[in-house]
Structures are given as C-alpha cells and as structure tokens.
Image (cartoon, rainbow, N blue to C red):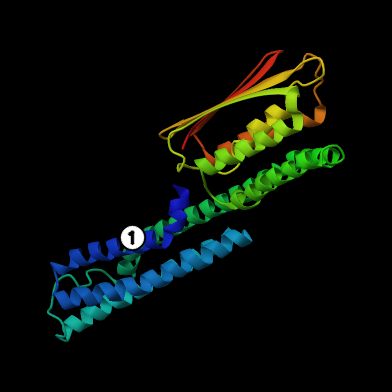
Amino acid sequence: MKGFFIKSYNGFVFLIWIMLVCLFLFQYITQVSFPEAILFSISVFLPTSLLTFYLSNNLLPKAIRNKNMNRFIIQFIIITLLTGVIHLITFTTFEKLEEIKVFETTELMRTRYPLIVEYMLTLPAIVVINLGFCGIRFYFEHSKLQEEHLKTQLQILQNQINPHFMFNVLNHIYILMQKDVELSSHLLVKYSEILRYQLYNGKREFSTLGEEIQFLKDVIDVEKMRWGKELNIDCKWSIENSEKEIQPLILFTLIENAFKHVSRSISETGYINIVFEQQGDSLYMEVENSKSTQQVKKKDSSGLGLKNAKERLKILYPNKHKLQIKETEQIYIIQLNITL
C-alpha cells in the first residue's frame, strides 16, 4: 500500500486540488456569474496552490532532512499569513470590479466586517489546507524513508545468503579436482548456474516460481554430488502454476540450513525430506532433516541463517506468512506457509 502511495503521490495530490477547486467553484457558480466564478476561483487557488506546494514539497522535506522543524513552523506561519493577505486582496479586488460594473453586483462580494476581521476569518481554512497537504507530504516522506530503509536492510540480508554455501562448494570442488576431474567439472558447471541465478535474479523484485524451483533443484543436485551416499535426499514438488511470482532466494536459506545441520557420518546416514506444494496463492514448504546424536552445536552458527530468513519474510511478506520450527533430539522440521 505504501509502495503504491509513493508511486502515485503527485497524482493523488493533483486529484485533491481538482476536488477542492470544483467544490469551491460549485459554491460560487450559483451566486455569481459563470465568468466571475471561474476567474475568482483561479485567482484564489492559483497562488494558494503554488504557496502550499512550495511549503509542503520544498520547505517540509528540507526541514525533515535537516531536522529543523522549528524553522519550518515559522515558515508555515509566514506562508499561511501571506496566503491570507492574497485572499483578502483578491476578495476586495473582485468587490471593486463589481462596483465599477465589470461584473454583475452580488451580495457575495460585499465586505460585512472590517478588513482585519475578514482577514482573520480566511485564516482557518488556509491553515486546514496547509496542514492537510503538509500532512500528506510528511506521510509520503516517512513512507519513502521506510522503503529505503527496508531496501537497505534487504540488501544487507541478501548479501549474507551467498558466502557460506559458496565457500563450501568451492572448497569441495578444489578437493574433488584432485580425485575426480570429470565430476568436479560437472559440479563447477552446475554451481555456475546457481551463482548466475543469485547474481542476476537476486537483484530482481520478483522471480517466477518455476525459476525459483529450478534454482532450488540445482542447489539440491550440487549437494547430492557433494555428499553422495552419506545422505538420503527425497524431494516432492507439486506446482500448479510455475508462472506465479515470488521473491527470489526467499526459500534458499531453509534448504541450506538443512544441509548445513543434517547428520552425516560413517556410522549413520542422514536424510533430508523436502515437500513443496503450490495451489492458487497458497505456497507450502516443509524441510525435514535428521540430527546427529553426536552433533555438537557451534556457537557461531546458532540460527544466523534462519534469523536472516525470518527478517526477510517479515519485510517481504508481512502478515502473509507463517514459519514454524519443530525440533527433537533426532529431527529438525521447518514448515513455511506463504500467501503469494
């Protein structure tokens, strides 16, 4: 919603001004001649809109950036008072124009109070208009700052995805090259496809579900080549629409976490079970891995990847996801539901 507001801000403000002019015009068009109503509306709203625009679109953002709201308050008061003076001059000018018979004489343009009282009566409406447009601009600036902060935060989290998996694969390729050149070459080609996806699709706002699943399958194939018979890997994919859009690399950490912590040793064969289902806008993914009875938890890897995944899900799918983690002494299960 905020993203849409940021993109359509100028159109939104323009629409409000059109509505205000129309309401003002309809109020006067029944009481004065049509040419006078048009000219009076332009004379009132043209300077008002220019001053309000300068106040809300120039002075307010500058005050927010410089953190100098006290100065802006003074500027707000000055521009409000100046607008009131312009309104009073416009009103008295049209009163004189009626007196000299340029326009038909009406009761609407008659001053009933002293000029200072008339001036004070115009100020509340001007204050409301200026406050309204400054409020809209303030919300816009706040939304824009939030979006920029989220983009920066996402970029930091995104940059944390690659290193661990990358170093493990490259190290394995280096060792494998001394034993099996053909397999290491095949592994390197497969990994280049993974890296290409991370580098290019990772920068996009969305990827298709088909692209993301193929990326995950490539990751799993690389891990299968790395660990061979030490792991049993079972995957079930059920995809209704591969053209559905999803945030890229949002699921990678869940699979990486399973391969990182699964049990594997000479005495025991570990396993990883992956279930992926997509139907309509509903996506469900479950990743289960065995835990070694001899596994010692490392202090430097205590859920950093999952913490990263949780933060990204909060940013990218607020109120549209549910992440559950179930853990026993033998198994570790991650279940993720996303509304696309």
Residue 312, above or below 101:
above
- Determine the residue located farthest toward the right in the rendered image: 178
Q: Is residue 197 left or right of residue 22?
A: right
Q: Is residue 255 left or right of residue 301?
A: left
Residue 302, above or below 292:
below
Give how far across and how far down residue 141 sits, in percent.
Answer: 52, 56
**Residue depicted at x 47% and y 56%:** 6
Give how far across and how far down residue 145 sits, in percent.
Answer: 57, 53
Q: Where, by quadrant of the figure, is residue 316 drawn? A: top right
Q: Can you identify the residue that label 1 sits on?
A: 16
**Residue depicted at x 68% and y 43%:** 190
Give how far across and how far down residue 230 sits, in percent.
Answer: 76, 23
**Residue depicted at x 32% and y 65%:** 122
Front residue (pair 36, 120): 36
Disc 1 on helix, strand or loop? helix
User: Can residue 315 be seen in the rendering of this structure?
Assistant: no
**Residue depicted at x 56% and y 49%:** 146
Q: Where, by quadrant of the figure, is residue 104 drawn? A: bottom left
User: Can residue 8 be seen in the rendering of this structure?
Assistant: yes
Front residue (pair 205, 92): 205
Q: Is residue 96 left or right of residue 321?
A: left
Residue 144, above or below 262:
below
Give the amino acid type for the residue marked by disc 1 in the picture.
Ile
